[in-house]
Amino acid sequence: MIVVAIDGPAGSGKSTVADALATALGVPHVDSGAYYRAATLAVLRAEVDPTDVGAVTAVVGRVVIDRVDGRTLLDGEDVEDDIRGATVTANVSAVAAHPAVRDLLLVAQRSGIARDGGVVDGRDAATRIVPDADLKVWLDADVEERGRRRALQAGEPERLDHHIADLHRRDAADATQMVRADDAVVVNTTGLSLDHVVATVADLARTAAGGS
Ligand code: DC
């Protein structure tokens, strides 16, 4: 049984690293941000103002969000593609900022961890979702590098400035939720390849599992 928590800002590579590490360890990857994204889609579909805490909490309390085989289900409907779009991304920080929403989603996020463990990625995985994790990693990278990754992912290398500005906006919007655990190992991924980062974190995980 090994539980790993990986936190960090948008574009730091957490989700990709968590996915690769989970595969290497043979445990599930719990993408905690996906739950906030699905909740945001439900809020937008209900045409509710994302800053209206009462209305948002009522909508999120009514829906069932699941993750199955890397896909996100909202009331049984596969919404994995919809939740990665620009509209959800622009509104998710406002929905995730409500403590009542965070309380509602915590149980579902924890339920993604299997009996033999899991790799949870997010903003508060190490401090709130799995505070007893065997290994806590804080992934970071310069905002310019995070912007380059996002621009490439979006197929828009010419819009680098736009993606950097967007990351500055999301860092500010997520600041309250983004908590680095005191006992987290900081890994700065600037200039490092994905393979290198996964190998580094996998080494840390093996050491943590071995209890040394
Ligand atoms: O990791 P992501 O970009 O898919 O996360 C989407 C949003 O959800 C992010 O802007 C902040 C929020 N989030 C959070 O508040 N706490 C988490 N544990 C994970 C994500």
Image (cartoon, rainbow, N blue to C red):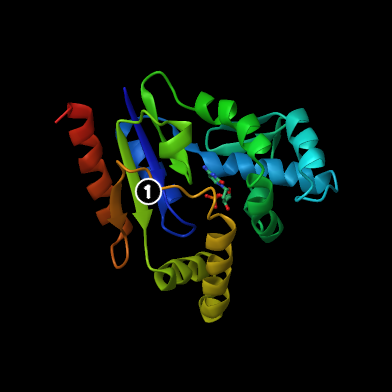
Q: Is residue 50 above or below residue 207?
A: below
Depth check: give the residue in front, 39 or 169.
169
Left or right relative to 55: residue 21: left
Whether residue 120 is visible here, answered yes or no, is no
Q: Position of residue 12 (x, y in %)?
A: 42, 58
Q: Quadrant of the C terminus?
A: top left
Alpha-carbon neighbours of circle 1 within 10 Å: few (<14), some, or many (≥20)? many
Outermost residue, left direction? 212
Q: Position of residue 142 (x, y in %)?
A: 38, 68
Q: Residue at x 82, y 46 (%)?
A: 45
Left or right relative to 75: residue 113: left
Q: Residue at x 29, y 54 (%)?
A: 187
Total numbered badges shown on the rendered structure:
1
Outermost residue, right direction? 47
Whether residue 65 is visible here, answered yes or no, is yes
Q: Amino acid at mark 1?
A: Val
Q: Residue at x 42, y 73 (%)?
A: 144
The image quadrant that residue 136 belongs to is: top left
Q: Position of residue 1 (x, y in %)?
A: 31, 22
Query: SS for tag 1?
Result: helix
The image quadrant that residue 191 belongs to is: bottom left
Q: Position of residue 65 (x, y in %)?
A: 66, 32
Left or right relative to 201: residue 145: right
Q: Residue at x 53, y 39 (%)?
A: 32
Q: Is mark 1 within 8 Å of ligand 1?
A: no
Give the labeled residue for mark 1: 17
